[in-house]
Image (spheres, rainbow, N blue to C red):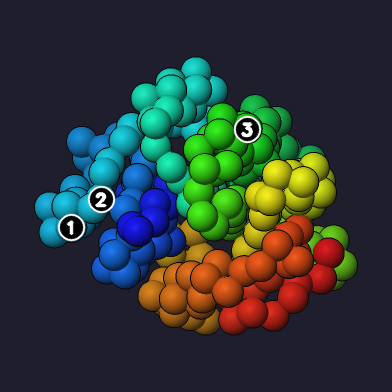
Amino acid sequence: MQKTVLITGANRGLGLEFSRQYAEAGWRVIATCRKPESAKALLALADEYSSVQIEALDVTDFAEIDGLSEQLADEVIDVLLNNAGVYGDTPEHGFGALDYQVWQTTLLINTIAPVKLAEAFLPHLERGANKLIASVSSLMGSVTDNTSGGSLVYRSSKAGLNAALKSLSIDLRSLGIGVLILHPGWVKTDMGGENALIDVEQSITGMRQVIKSFTLSQSGQFIKYDGTIMPW
């Protein structure tokens, strides 16, 4: 039976490559982004693969999330893949000149929205085979690994995401639903920059393997794209 993955932030970078690889592997892909009409690469992917369904979704709009959940009420979702995210930090807005509105928005997108999506699509996941919530976090969310400081906005948003997902892994275990926290590595994307160590294809191939081999005993773990367990 064909499996289904719902991916947020699917119009570029990691989300686009997740969509491409899952479609190529024969999955049904529900690819979401804020403005599908201008997502040229994603539209081209949908033209290439009939299994790719594009839906408009702004993860900061919880009414939109609920609306999409209702629209897809009869669907089975095997993997909910929370990929949408922003960096938030800028050189001109470090400590002493922080933009608190940007910080709030970053927390909304990176930390709160993935939990809202899990809540909204819980019934769809319960009917799935994988029953997995997978979220793209970052090593920068690790308190243990933080030896350089800086990036207050991004670090706090990902640390908050990790903490929330760890709680969800405990709360949802009785339903048989797993929670996986992923570190994609330092990837050559708009966010990662050209000096990053790995390309998008390598990162996504690795994370898909981690997802594929996931068992409920791993729920709540923070895992790198190559299978390495990350420090909290």
Query: Residue 118, how many percent across, how many down?
Result: 60, 38
Secondary element under disc 3, as helix, strand or loop, is helix
Query: Residue 173, how many percent across, how many down?
Result: 76, 50
Q: Residue at x 33, y 32 (%)?
A: 56
Q: Residue at x 39, y 52 (%)?
A: 4
Secondary element under disc 1, as helix, strand or loop, is loop
Q: Are marks 2 and 3 in contact (CB under 8 Å)?
A: no
User: Of the numbered discs in the image, which one, if any, rests on residue 138?
Assistant: none
Q: Residues within 10 Å of mark 3 (few under 14, many from 20)?
A: some
Q: Quadrant of the C terminus?
A: bottom right
Q: Which label's residue is closer to the chain start, 3 or 1?
A: 1
Query: Residue 52, how many percent across, how many down?
Result: 25, 50
Residue of label 3:
119
Q: Nearer the viewer, residue 119 or 203?
A: 119
- Would residue 51 be visible to someone looking at this image? yes
Residue farthest left in this picture: 47
Q: Nearer the viewer, residue 116 or 161?
A: 116
Q: Residue at x 39, y 31 (%)?
A: 74
Q: Residues within 10 Å of mark 2 (few under 14, many from 20)?
A: many
Above or below: residue 10 compared with residue 206: above
Q: Amino acid at mark 1?
A: Tyr
Q: Residue at x 39, y 37 (%)?
A: 75
Q: Are marks 2 and 1 in contact (CB under 8 Å)?
A: yes
Q: Nearer the viewer, residue 223 or 105?
A: 223
Secondary element under disc 2, as helix, strand or loop, is strand
Residue of label 1:
49
Residue of label 2:
52
Query: Residue 99, how many percent across, how many down?
Result: 67, 34
Q: Amino acid at mark 2?
A: Val
